[in-house]
Amino acid sequence: MDHKFPPLKNDLLLRAARGEPVERVPVWAMRQAGRYLPEFKATRAEHEFFKVCRTPELACEVTLQPLRRYDFDASIIFSDILVIPQALGMTVEMVPGKGPSFPEPLVTPEDMEKLDTKCKVAESLSYVYEAVTLTRMKIDGQCPLIGFAGAPWTLMSYMIEGGGTKTHSKAKKWLYCYPEASHKLLQLLADVIVDHLVLQICAGAQLVQLFESHAGILGPNLFYKFALPYIKYISVKVREALTAKEVEHVPMTIFAKDAHFALEELADSGYEVISLDWTIKPKHARSRCGENVTLQGNLDPCALYASKEEIGEFAKELVHSFGTKRWIANLGHGMYPDHDPEHLEAFIEAIHKYSQQPSDEL
Ligand code: CP3
């Protein structure tokens, strides 16, 4: 690429993702930029959520906030998975205390005609790529920068449900009643996601993570039919596009929350890293995923409510169960707004302490 980025001083995350030896296990936290941080809340008090996403300087600032506090081994660009439905012409609002809301969700397949299927992602989401490049410069090589996107099913479910839901029954109804239209929508989303990930990589993202946060609600049959094929398609197409552009490949992570039934298939879906939620036993995951993928996770986010001493013990147990090879320490899902920032620090420090390798064993 044309950008001349500062040299990377800490590549633990990338080495762990590629299965290379590490002197200590890399650690970061999903939603590490978020409302548990007073400095994030201060930024949000002044600027609306999507304004932060759309203003590269603000997105960069909140991405860097957790790095100023913690000894993290990765950063993740501040954005949202719902920028893709926005690029397709849908209105998405972030309602305080409620979460994302679509005033006009898709109700029937005819509503797909309202989508801007010819959308030019490079233009409509240019603010994300500008934020990635700016942040990569400003991080100054402190650690790698992760880019991300929502996976097709998770985005489809938001676009139909219009917001949070327990059952996802409106979106699942599409899968049973309109399977062809569902595949059409999922394919459209998959192609936009491929472009969005490739453009983030070209802009400077050093690893990309795909969030299939609503995988569990599908169960095995629907997951194999409507989620997994697109997850695989995305890993194949991103690599093909990078090769065609002569851009160096970056590791890819898949987080399919609650899809424990599909661990074997996920390990074989073209991603270097499988991110696990907290309901999966580390040793069980390793035996089912094999030795050729890196695992990421999987402390229960609620474990951060425990005392700092207990958090240290949880971290020790995780190091013991995952081992120090091919593992990236993280939570099993994102930070919550009422987490104590000091408790996250206790987790990070304990992971570093217990996973430190004697140099002669590397
Ligand atoms: O991890 C990071 O620090 C990077 C930023 C990031 C955000 N959203 C910022 C955010 C990432 C990676 C996401 C992904 C995302 N967004 C997912 C996938 C991960 C997951 O949680 O399963 C999903 C499902 C969304 C959609 C979304 N955006 C939800 C459900 C919410 C929370 C609503 C709420 O009020 O709890 C958001 C809002 C959001 N995205 C916040 C942040 C920091 C908090 C909202 C705020 O600041 O007002």
Image (tube, helix red, strand yellow):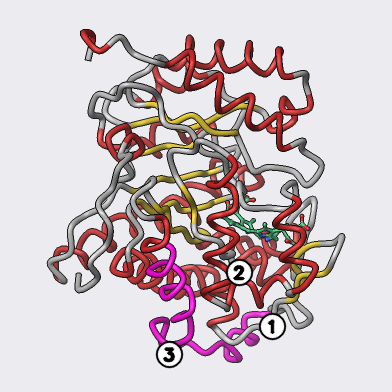
Q: Give the camera-side residue of 234 and 132.
A: 132
Q: Which residue is mark 3?
A: 118
Q: Which residue is mark 1?
A: 91
Note whether ligand 1 is within 8 Å of mark 2: yes
Is mark 1 in CB contact (under 8 Å) with mark 2?
Answer: no
Q: Which residue is mark 2?
A: 82
Q: Give the camera-side residue of 362 and 17.
A: 362
User: Going from the N terminus, do you reach mark 1 or mark 2 first?
Assistant: 2
As drawn, 130 above or below 119 = above
Cα separation, mark 3 vs mark 2, equals 18 Å
User: Going from the N terminus, do you reach mark 3 or mark 1 first?
Assistant: 1
Cα separation, mark 3 vs mark 1, equals 17 Å
Q: Which residues are magenta?
A: 108-135
Cα separation, mark 1 vs mark 2, equals 10 Å
Q: Position of residue 176 (x, y in %)?
A: 63, 61
| Image point (51%, 38%), residue name | 28
